[in-house]
Amino acid sequence: MTRLSIWRAGMVVLCCLASGPVHAGPPYRTDDPEPTEFRHFEIYTFSTGTVVRRDTTGTLPGIELNYGLIPNGQLTIDTVAAFDSPSSGPMQYGYGDTPISFKYRFIQEDSKGWRPQAAVFPQVNLPTGDEDRGLGVGHVQVLLPMWFQKSFGDWTIDGGGGFGSTKAAQTRIFGSLVCCCSEK
């Protein structure tokens, strides 16, 4: 094996050992620091789902709209059709909560050195879903993450985390690490 092959294999093992559970969100609470290009749009469709003790909740479908509002800055708005299928009642379906966020990359990656790119991506989840039907949380949620990315040839490593406030008295920490290899 070449030195580069050993290094790549080591990175894959490190990523697998360092991974752990993360909290999913629209479309995920994992991301990267790269914003949509200035004055360009991106549209994604997605679906999420969670099963806990035979209670299933999620979104189907969800649509995420990203717009490059300023250089290195992206405005994001999600719209979701939420569902809740409790183990002890009928399935509910309707409009869910609405996340609005703004990603700002404040450090550009140094392609020949070790400096990664970095961004903040604060998000406010507006309580537009019907909490009584299980289609929303009934209060504003705030997420304050930072995301980092570094590329090494064909390999890219993304990671980050932050704080999330679900109610005035509840704060949680979340994070993720993602390793990718792309063909050039």
Image: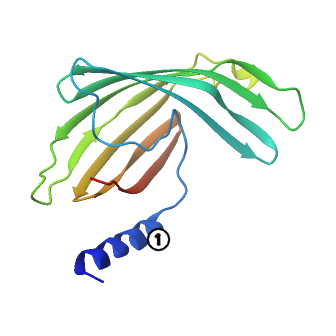
Q: Where in the figure is residue 113, as x and y percent of width and height?
A: 10, 59
At 89% from the left and 30% from the top, the residue drawn is: 89
**Amino acid type indicated by mark 1:** Leu
Evaluate whether residue 69 shows in this view: yes
At 18% from the left and 38% from the top, the residue drawn is: 106
The picture quadrant where one finds residue 90 is top right
Q: Residues within 10 Å of mark 1 (few under 14, many from 20)?
A: few
The picture quadrant where one finds residue 83 is top right
In the rendered structure, the answer to whether residue 33 lies left or right of residue 65 reads left
Residue 131, compared with residue 85, is above or below; it is above
Seen from the viewer's position, the closer of residues 92 and 48 is 48
Q: Where in the figure is residue 159, as x and y percent of width and height?
A: 36, 53
Q: Where in the figure is residue 51, as x and y percent of width and height?
A: 73, 44
Residue 145, compared with residue 150, is above or below; it is above
Picture mark count: 1
The picture quadrant where one finds residue 138 is top right
Seen from the viewer's position, the closer of residues 139 and 136 is 136
Toward the bottom, the furthest residue is: 1
Seen from the viewer's position, the closer of residues 56 and 47 is 47
Evaluate whether residue 168 shows in this view: no
Residue receiving disc 1: 17
Q: Indicate the secondary structure of the residue bearing disc 1.
A: helix
At 45% from the left and 31% from the top, the residue drawn is: 142
At 46% from the left and 49% from the top, the residue drawn is: 173
